[in-house]
Image: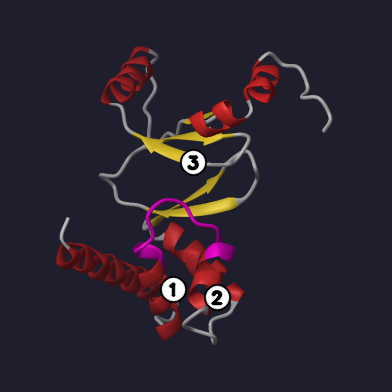
């Protein structure tokens, strides 16, 4: 994907945010614009703290509360998805209606792998239809052990998988 196309998409999303803010009676500020730009360039998931640390390197005047509130507004506007995985940390990811994906989450290192599978999506739609259920949204999160953790700690992942506690270190 070329950089101008991405910049153009970011500009469109920022305009969508401005319209949302105006509609809801919020101000469109320079700080919100900086936060939104940095967030929309993000690939993957980011916590408010991670985004704050990233922004503080160039923008000392931006506070954590402003970052947190702007992420909440991005989520309410439909431009971000708020995710809470097993570690109970709230993460955000840029969202587009065409960007549906699911997650594999490692319970050892916390890595998150995104994946798409049309067969799974069709199966979920078929099950909902067969049960007379109208789905408006869904998410799938699979928890387990990534290949790196499995190879680094084979005995630990075997114990966890079988339901036994890992030995104390």
- The colour scheme used here is secondary structure
Question: How far is mark 2 from mark 3, CA to CA?
Answer: 26 Å
**Is residue 15 toward the left or the right of residue 35 in the image?**
left
Question: How far is mark 3 from mark 1, CA to CA?
Answer: 23 Å
Q: Position of residue 69 (x, y in %)?
A: 54, 69
**Which residue is the site of mark 1?**
35
Residue at x 28%, y 47% (from the top left corner): 97
The magenta segment is 39-50
Q: Position of residue 122 (x, y in %)?
A: 28, 21
Residue 21 vs residue 81, the one in the foreground: 81
Residue at x 44%, y 73% (from the top left corner): 35
Q: Which of pointers 2 and 3 indicates the residue nearer the eye?
A: 3
Residue at x 68%, y 13% (from the top left corner): 162
Q: Is residue 150 above or below residue 59?
A: above
**Is residue 19 toward the left or the right of residue 159 in the image?**
left
Mark linked to residue 66: 2
Residue 69 vs residue 115, the one in the foreground: 115
Q: Quadrant of residue 11?
A: bottom left
Q: Is residue 45 magenta?
A: yes
**Which residue is the site of mark 3?**
112
Res 69 seen here? no
User: Do residues under tags 1 and 2 come within 8 Å of each other at their CB atoms?
Assistant: yes
Q: Which badge, 1 or 2, is on the more N-terminal residue?
A: 1
Q: Position of residue 85 (x, y in %)?
A: 58, 41
Q: Is residue 6 above or below residue 139?
A: below
């Amino acid at each position: 994907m070329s950089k101008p196309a991405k910049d153009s998409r970011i500009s469109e999303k920022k305009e969508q945010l401005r319209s949302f803010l105006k509609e809801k009676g919020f101000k469109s500020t320079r700080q919100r614009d900086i936060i939104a730009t940095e967030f929309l360039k993000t690939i993957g998931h980011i916590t408010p703290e991670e985004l704050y640390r990233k922004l503080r390197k160039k923008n000392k005047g931006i506070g954590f509360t402003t970052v947190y509130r702007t992420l909440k507004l991005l989520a309410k506007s439909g431009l971000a998805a708020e995710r809470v995985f097993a570690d109970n940390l709230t993460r955000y990811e840029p969202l587009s209606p065409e960007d549906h994906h699911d997650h594999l989450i490692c319970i050892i290192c916390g890595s998150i792998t995104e994946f798409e599978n049309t067969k799974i999506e069709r199966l979920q739609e078929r099950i909902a239809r067969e049960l007379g259920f109208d789905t408006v949204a869904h998410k799938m999160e699979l928890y387990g052990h990534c290949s790196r953790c499995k190879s680094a700690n084979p005995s630990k992942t075997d114990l966890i998988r079988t339901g036994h506690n890992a030995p104390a270190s």
